[in-house]
Image: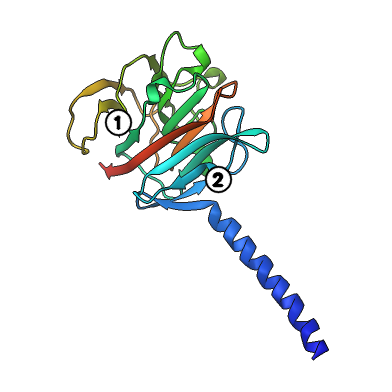
Amino acid sequence: MENASRTLLPRLIIAFIALCFSQCVQAQTITWASHTWKVTSGGMAGVARGNPENVSVDDKGYLHLHIEKRDGKWTAAELFTIERFGFGAYQWVIEGNVYDMDPTTVLGLFPYGPVHHIGVDAENEIDIEFSQWNMTCKGCNADFTVYPSTGNQKPKGVSAWEDNFHVTGGTLTTARMEWASDHIVFTLMNGVHPIGTTADVIKTETYSSDSKNIPQVALPVGINLWCFRATPAKNQTVIIQSFHFVPK
């Protein structure tokens, strides 16, 4: 009996370690908006590291992102789809006043290739961002940005095109980008509006260019809430009610 116990104990320990490892791996991915997303743990944009504890889905199916101080250190939130998406309409519905967050806070909504090794940083990226950029952008609180296709990075990693602007919005925003091979239409609207409809527009803008300045390959989609150059005065939270993609 004693020998049997000695044999069983290592097996139990191995099983326990395997279970813990499995749970840790599972904690790095979530299912949301009918897609599987990998949650960043560690290095990401800005001065705060990503922490999976800052990403969750509530009973309504809404995605919650947080910037929080954990164990004395500021942490942020980021996730990327496992799947890649190409030309088409991308839409997020955001709850809360993202136009007046702490000046250091950035909410990014963006197809981004380098996370899947499709080009390098400052290539293959299309952004809708909400931020005051730590008061460095002359009063802006949002921007649209396009980074070029693979191999066409601009000098010093600057974008192919960027527009920083100030708008006044409500506490429910539809953010949409319509990506084609030669142009991208960006639209912000108050309220919730299905893809294919446009109403109560806060800001809309079209960027047109050739294939060098617009990404041409399918890319994963990223969402992040992060800290630009400094950390906020208090914890930050953003709720994303939904994400939809309609291919072109």
Q: Position of residue 130 (x, y in %)?
A: 41, 24
Farthest front residue in view: 234
Residue 172, label in figure: 1
Farthest bottom residue in view: 1
Does residue 165 appear to the left or right of 79 in the view shown?
A: left
> What amino acid is found at the position of numbered circle 2 in the picture?
Glu
Query: Residue at (47%, 46%) from the top-left corner?
Result: 56
Residue 245: tell me if it is visible: yes
Give above or below for 175 relative to 59.
above
Mark 2 and mark 1: Cα distance apart in space = 25 Å
Q: Position of residue 213 (x, y in %)?
A: 40, 25
Q: Tell me which corner region of the image, top left, top right, bottom left or bottom right, holds residue 43.
A: top right
The residue carrying pointer 1 sits among few (fewer than 14), some (14 to 19) or many (20 or more) residues within 10 Å by Cα, namely some
Q: Position of residue 223 (x, y in %)?
A: 44, 37
Q: Which residue is mark 2?
A: 53
Query: Residue at (52%, 16%) from the top-left corner?
Result: 134
